[in-house]
């Protein structure tokens, strides 16, 4: 499957890293695009080098090198490369994930600006009735942000907040990340075993499901 992965400048770069790792390990072809702000957050949160990297491209390359699995294929795309295949509905790609998704990118998608490759791919998915999953990370949220999420949902996208459930009894931050990534893969129709399915785990140990 060919999947586009946009990594934008919301906190939670680890969500994008884990999506890339799991999708490539499963043999998928992933087009990765890191926004400039996404590179800042990767540099700060994953590389521990602060939010002002010397080169956004260098950060994106290191992100791919660190997290992609050789079982899959990766195409690293620049945010201004609106001539790449993923930017056109005729490319046939029908799945895109934006993880994490900033509120800025939510606004661009909701208003259809097509300003960067990430915004354009989201627009293409919506117009072609493909799968668009966005994972916003912000709290609290303004009415404007809520309306943008509503607009994206009305247009056929899936808004999947970075909001891990606790009923799977997470034991680590990795478990929390995998819960959110697994939910995103579920709606994209990608198989995974990132968390125990409700009803297939030790429910006595798992407590009460709400
Ligand atoms: C370290 C850091 C953390 C940020 N965290 C968030 C966040 O959690 N959510 C959000 O919507 N924006 C966050 N931002 C702000 C976005 O990066 C900013 O709005 C940017 O313009 C988004 O651009 P993009 O959507 O093209 O990536 C953060 C910025 C930095 C530098």
Image (cartoon, rainbow, N blue to C red):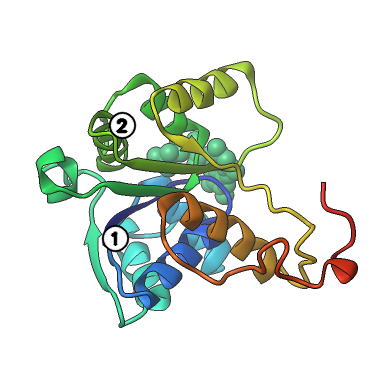
To which quarter of the image does residue 207 belong? bottom right
Extreme residue toward the bottom, this view: 70
To which quarter of the image does residue 108 belong? top left
Q: Position of residue 48 (x, y in %)?
A: 56, 68
Residue at the (46%, 53%) spot, across then down: 40
Mark 1 near ligand 1 (CB under 8 Å)? no
**Quick one: label 1, few (<14), some, or many (20+) residues within 10 Å?**
some
Image-based side of 105 in relation to 183, left or right? left
Residue at the (12%, 47%) spot, across then down: 91
The residue where tag 2 is placed is: 126
Which of the two marks, 1 or 2, is nearer to us in this view? 2
Q: Position of residue 104 (x, y in %)?
A: 46, 31
Secondary structure of the residue carrying numbered label 1: helix
Residue 23 to residue 162: above or below: below
Residue at the (30%, 56%) spot, across then down: 3
Q: Which mark is residue 57?
A: 1
Find the distance from the CA under tag 1 to the CA under tag 2.
28 Å
Image-based side of 155 in relation to 32, left or right? right
**Quick one: label 2, few (<14), some, or many (20+) residues within 10 Å?**
many
Q: Nearer the viewer, residue 145 or 35?
A: 145
Mark 2 near ligand 1 (CB under 8 Å)? no
Q: Position of residue 122 (x, y in %)?
A: 32, 37
Q: Earlier in the sequence, mark 1 or mark 2?
A: 1
Name the image quarter holding the N terminus. Answer: bottom left
Residue at the (17%, 46%) spot, across then down: 81
């Amino acid at each position: 499957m060919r999947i586009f992965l946009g990594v934008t400048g919301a906190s939670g770069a680890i969500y994008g890293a884990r999506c890339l790792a799991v999708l490539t390990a499963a043999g998928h072809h992933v087009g990765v695009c890191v926004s400039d702000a996404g590179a800042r957050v990767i540099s700060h949160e994953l590389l521990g080098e602060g939010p002002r990297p010397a080169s956004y491209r260098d950060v994106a390359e290191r992100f791919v090198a660190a997290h992609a699995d050789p079982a899959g294929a990766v195409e690293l795309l620049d945010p201004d490369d609106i001539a790449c295949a993923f930017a056109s509905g005729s490319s046939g790609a029908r799945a895109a994930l934006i993880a994490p998704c900033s509120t800025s990118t939510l606004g661009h998608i909701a208003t259809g600006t097509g300003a960067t490759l990430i915004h354009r791919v989201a627009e293409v998915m919506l117009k072609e009735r493909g799968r668009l999953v966005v994972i916003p990370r912000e709290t609290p949220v303004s009415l404007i942000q809520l309306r943008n999420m509503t607009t994206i949902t009305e247009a056929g996208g899936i808004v999947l907040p970075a909001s891990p459930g606790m009923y799977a009894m997470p034991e680590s931050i990795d478990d929390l990340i995998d819960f959110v990534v697994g939910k995103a893969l579920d709606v994209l129709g990608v198989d995974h075993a990132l968390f125990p399915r409700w009803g297939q785990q030790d429910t006595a140990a798992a407590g009460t499901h709400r």
